[in-house]
Image (spheres, rainbow, N blue to C red):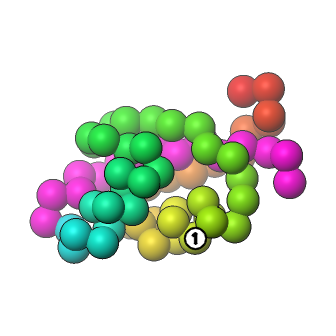
Amino acid sequence: MGEQLKIRQVKSGLGAPRKQRDTLRALGLKHHQDQVVQPDNPAIRGMIHAVAHLVEAEEVGSDG
């Protein structure tokens, strides 16, 4: 894989179930419009899938 994913929170986690809020926190997203870069692996992809309605993700090269 070697690629990375840029993940941006586009909707607030307020009102979402606790499990989804915890998933956002585990991804490193603390608040609305926060953005992080995570390695592209099945675990991260699964987390993104669980909160797909709250985040946007795009692939970026490993150099940023």
Q: Is residue 41 magenta?
A: no
At x 61% / y 44%, what residue is drawn? 38
Q: The C terminus is located in which quarter?
A: top right
48 lies left or right of 22 = right
31 lies left or right of 37 = left
Query: Does residue 27 sit above or below 41 in this rendering?
Result: above
Magenta-highlighted residues: 1-15
Residue at the extreme right of the image, as rendered: 1
Residue at the extreme top of the image, as rendered: 63
Disc 1 crowd, CA 10 A, few/some/many (<14, 14-19, 20+): few
**Whole-percent x and y of residue 5?**
65, 46
Kind of residue indicated by mark 1: Gly
Decide which of 41, 15 is in the foreground and name it: 41
**Whole-percent x and y of residue 33?**
34, 37
Q: Quadrant of residue 55?
A: bottom left
Image label count? 1
Q: Is residue 3 magenta?
A: yes
Q: The N terminus is located in which quarter?
A: bottom right
Residue at the extreme left of the image, as rendered: 15
Disc 1: which residue: 46
At x 52% / y 63%, what residue is drawn? 48
Decide which of 23, 60 is in the foreground and name it: 23
At x 42% / y 54%, what residue is drawn? 26
At mark 1, the secondary structure is helix
Query: Does residue 51 sit above or below 14 in this rendering?
Result: below
**Whole-percent x and y of residue 22?**
32, 61
